Amino acid sequence: MSGKTVWVATRKGTFKIEKSGGRWRAALVGHAGIGVNYVARDPNTKRLWALLGHGHWGAKLSISDDDGATWRDNPAQVKYPEGARYIGQDMYEDAASEVGVGWKTTVRNATLLKLWVIAFGNDGALWIGTIPGGLFESRDGGTSFELNRPLWNHESRGGDLFAGEGTGETQWFGTPASEGGEFAPGIHSIAIDPRSPQRLLIAVSTAGVLETSDGGHTWRSRNKGMTMDHNPDPEAEWGHDPHLIELCQSAPDHVWQQNHAGVFFSDNGAQQWRKVSAPGEGVHFGFPVTVDAHDGKVAWLVPGRSDAQRMTIDGGLFVARTDDGGASWRQLRNGLPQEAAYDVVYRHALDNREDAVAFGSTTGNLYLSEDRGESWAVVSHNLPPIYAVRFG
């Protein structure tokens, strides 16, 4: 692990984690007092990208070319084009419904509610996922960004609303994860196939997983095998709530998914998923998952108790690891608190690099393992709420 750096995006700034004098230390290096949804380094250019949520001032891209010593706004910012609209879902009280609520569709003008994730293709392309469900791409290193219209106009979300009113129906529902809590779809996962940067998998809360193999010109659903326990039709094509997807860099057909309804694994490039939850081992509900770069059957996640009780299981924090594609799971607890721990780990707040694994929680706790999770050390108990953790 010598010389490696961990970047941490928090509610109150960007932190850089490095090892010094045998200890891992956290330093605030940018965006003090500002919400940072995600921070990552472009492996092609070594530039750092931070996705900010300014609250009153909106979402902005910030960049650093000197390893976080200084930051500046990216000259080009993500912006929805004039005329961009989408079909949203509004909840209303419905006495006739079994759950007492119903949903009605409304057409909304698209404005940027959140910059959620950025990904880098080995062809130099940059991809950014947003709320309300726009995928933006740059082919010039971030000098400009353009909305991917084939995905925005996909039939699953009502067709081309630039040209008219579309079908009036959408299969893309929402998430309250925007800066202001507005309920709208969000793209939080972008997995790029290292064999072919024209092939991407994206995950949408709430809709499911979609794939392109031609650089975003066409898209298809990749939800076969996924189930929704809460839905009258558990195997419906749309309506799934993947919390995160990630593929193996050395075996890209091995794809992992932490889903609202469990843990899913695919060994054929997401053409077919299978559920690999193990509720008896505490492995079912959660948000993050990270995959070993060399072995697609090895993955780590941080389980939560349930959707209704988003906290650790029985007050003890642990990381779960599988070495066999989800056939079995181990609970890794050494060095983690086992009493009165109530951490929640967000979808981007777990990562691995070689033998190191790191994760952070909404209570400002940051942990790091240098032996694949067998034992853990505390980096800090005093950070702001942690949104993302990335090696690089």
Image (cartoon, grey):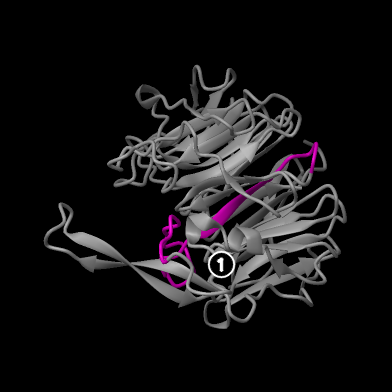
Residue 322 in sight in this render:
yes
Q: Amino acid at mark 1?
A: Asp
Seen from the viewer's position, the closer of residues 79 and 89 is 89
Above or below, comparing residue 41 to residue 93 in the picture: above
Q: Is residue 30 left or right of residue 34?
A: right
Main secondary-structure element of the magenta-colored stretch:
loop
Residue 336 in sight in this render:
no
Residue beneath the point at 35% across and 42% down: 340
Q: Quadrant of residue 13?
A: bottom right
Seen from the viewer's position, the closer of residues 38 and 215 is 215
| Rendered location of residue 1, percent (x, y) | 77, 36
Q: Quadrant of residue 84?
A: bottom right
Toward the left, the furthest residue is 95
Q: Quadrant of residue 19?
A: top right
**50 falls in the magenta region:** no
Seen from the viewer's position, the closer of residues 120 and 159 is 159
| Rendered location of residue 149, percent (x, y) | 65, 64
Residue beneath the point at 53% across and 48% down: 347
| Residue position for label 1 | 160
Say what secondary structure mark 1 lies in.
loop
Above or below, comparing residue 311 to residue 54 in the picture: above
**194 falls in the magenta region:** yes
Above or below, comparing residue 267 to residue 364 in the picture: above
Above or below, comparing residue 4 to residue 335 in the picture: below
Task: Give the magenta part as a residue range.
Answer: 168-196
| Rendered location of residue 12, percent (x, y) | 57, 67
Residue beneath the point at 80% across and 54% down: 42
